[in-house]
Image (spheres, rainbow, N blue to C red):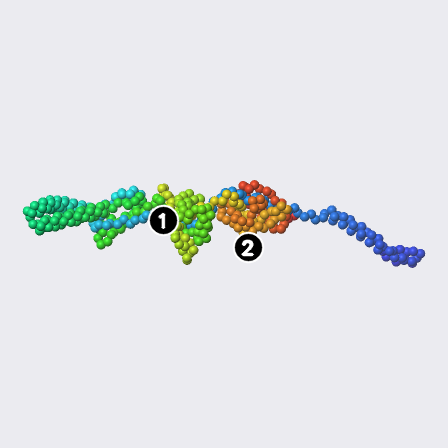
Amino acid sequence: MRLAPTPPHFVQSNGNIVRLRTAPLLRIAFAGFAFVNLSACDQNSFVPPPPPKVEVAPPVQRAITRYLDATGNTAPIQTVDLVARVQGFLQSIDYKDGAFVKKGTTLFTIEPETYKLKLEQAQAAEVGAQATVKQAEADYKRQVELVQRQAVSQSTLDTSTSTRDNATSNLTQAQVNTKIAAVNYGYTNVAAPFDGIVSNHLVSVGELVGVASPTQLATIVQLDPIYVNFNVSEQDVQRVRDEARRRGIPIDEIRQLPVEVGLQTETGYPHKGKLDYVGPTVNQSTGTLPVRGLIPNPDRALLPGFYVRVRVPFDKQDNALLVPDTAIGSDQAGRYVLVVNADNVVEQRKVTTGPLDEGLRVIESGLKADDRVVTAGLLRAIPGQKVDPQLQKAEAAAAPSKEAAPAPAK
């Protein structure tokens, strides 16, 4: 008789099949395996990454000059339309269109012969009137002596007196006619009233001018010096007046403030001048005050009608704090900078900003001279978290730094 095979985990004992108790052995083996795995996990425990590195620098501290910035337009201080003030045919044009001429230079000549003859005629009449006055004066003196000797009647003296007075009046009229004739003769020579550039001529030689009304011949414009007209806001006007009051400067002396001008294609403000006029009232519709500067223009680099940049220095500050403009952020509450405190934790500091000065932004308030401002690595600087600050020199903060991209997490 063939016996059936014994199942696993069973044995035969005295002809009986007995099941082995293996559960405790399995539990012991599983526990040992788990202990080995836990030991391996302890060797690969999580290590937090180091704080991110950011570049920090203290604010730059130096003296600055505060400016009023504006935009304006140039305008000539003198521009005159040259006209024919006497009637006649245009005899000559004595300049080149667009040329620079000096004061007194002859520009146009209107036929002078007729007016020269009228002047000579008036001069001759004046000479005759002088002779008449001389004769009448001698006759009057003679009649006075005769009356005193009772040789002639008083009526004869009265007639001599009247004749003398009429001759004197005629002489005065002749002198006036001579002056008028001289003035009209001078009008035949149209000269430059000041140094300037003359426009193209508007009439031709041989054309009759000054017939019914003065005929415009050309226009002359003075370019040196030149005006710069611009407007200053009401807030800036108050700032300047308050600063002048603080420094004890009379309001009238504000006109002595310098003015700096630059063209759109120029770097900086190479043209220097001074204030020439400040309007007496603020425009209610625009809230601005009209101001004018006077700028020397010897090389005629500024032409009337140019659109220019204008700034007026009105205050100096000895110890201003400045940071790179890229280190300043903004949110709904305003402008801010990120600073690293003594525990190397990032803080967000609200600041009031001022103007740019040589590439740096002036900080009016909210920052101290010993603060460490984050200048690079701004994406890695999160308020409330710790960082590894890399200190830069204050001068290095002026150079724009390139924001480094965060390294990929491993």
**Residue labelled with disc 1:** 75
Q: Where is residue 262 in the image (x, y as percent from the top left)?
A: 42, 45
Residue 263 visible in the displayed image: no
Q: Which of 257 and 358 is in front in this view?
A: 257
Q: Helix or strand or loop: what does disc 1 sit on?
A: strand
**Residue labelled with disc 2:** 333
The amino acid type found where label 2 is placed reads Ala
Q: At x 55% / y 49%, what residue is drawn?
A: 366
The outermost residue toward the left is 151
The outermost residue toward the front is 149
Q: Where is residue 183 in the image (x, y as percent from the top left)?
A: 21, 47
Q: Nearer the viewer, residue 153 or 306?
A: 153
Q: Position of residue 42 (x, y in %)?
A: 74, 48
The amino acid type found where label 1 is placed reads Ala
**Relative horizontal placement of residue 384, taking residue 272 as reference (left or right):** right
Whichever of labels 1 and 2 marks the residue nearer the N terminus, that label is 1
Q: Within 10 angstroms of label 1, few (less than 14), some, or many (20 or more) residues? A: many
